[in-house]
Amino acid sequence: MSARPHLALAFLLIAAPAFAAGPPPVTFESIDGGRIQFTQLQNEGPVLVVNTASLCGFTPQYDDLQALWDRYRDRGLTVLAVPSDDFRQELDDEGSVREFCATNFDLTIPMTVITRVTGEAAHPFYRWLAEEHGVVPRWNFHKVLIDGNGEVVASWPSPVRPTDPAIVDRIEALLP
């Protein structure tokens, strides 16, 4: 038996951490149809990921999310809303969520279908946040900022508004 397969395996094991930076190559289903490739978003610049719910007391934060998107999208920021019913405050289906957000907030930010964000059935992105960074949403409108390299920069709990200086300062530091 040749030693080469073992050398190749050793190389892969040693090199694996270098390839493990950032979230796994995950895809979200878009509420408008199609798919959202997370790595494509992060390659364009920082991504603020927010698990949302239409019937939550924090739902007015949609206005702030849209304001961030309007202000910084041309500089590379993506604001990604991830509707979730994990805390039992989301509407019954994606059509209702899309209509609610369009009617009440005139949202144009990218949005996923209703997605699990906690527990074993969580979307792979949220499992990665939990397992690799200890970041688990405790409620709706938890915010996570990912830089263009896929690294977690910071996370903020629900009460912190998306336009809070702590978030805006971190976003601006990542933009060209």
Image (tube, rainbow, N blue to C red):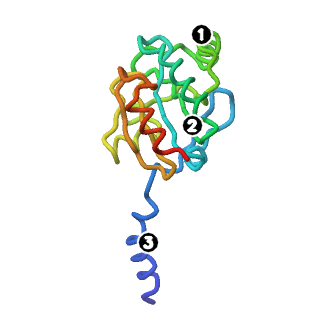
For label 1, the SS is: helix
Which image quadrant is residue 18 in? bottom left
For label 3, the SS is: helix
List x then y, in percent, for residue 136: 34, 34
Residue 59 or residue 10, whichever sits in front: 59
Task: Name the residue rendered at 45%, 89% in the picture.
Answer: 2
From this viewpoint, which residue is outermost toward the left?
A: 134
Q: Which residue is mark 1?
A: 104
- Categorize mark 2 by other alpha carbons within 10 Å: few (<14), some (14-19), many (20+): many
* Labels in figure, total: 3
Amino acid tagged 3: Leu
- Categorize mark 1 by other alpha carbons within 10 Å: few (<14), some (14-19), many (20+): few
| Badge 1 or badge 3: first in the primary sequence | 3
Q: Which residue is mark 2?
A: 78
State whether residue 112 is above or below residue 97: below
List x then y, in percent, for residue 174: 48, 45
List x then y, in percent, for residue 170: 42, 39
Q: Is residue 173 left or right of residue 27?
A: left
Amino acid tagged 2: Thr
Q: Which residue is mark 3?
A: 12
Alpha carbon separation for disc pair 1 and 2: 21 Å
Which image quadrant is residue 168 in? top left
Pick the quarter of the image with the N terminus: bottom left
Residue 78 or residue 9, whichever sits in front: 78
Task: Name the residue rendered at 61%, 35% in the picture.
Answer: 73
Alpha carbon separation for disc pair 2 and 3: 33 Å
Task: Name the residue rendered at 35%, 40% in the picture.
Answer: 130
Amino acid tagged 1: Asn
List x then y, in percent, for residue 155: 37, 35
State whether residue 19 is above or below residue 48: below
Is label 1 in contact with label 2 (beta carbons under 8 Å)? no
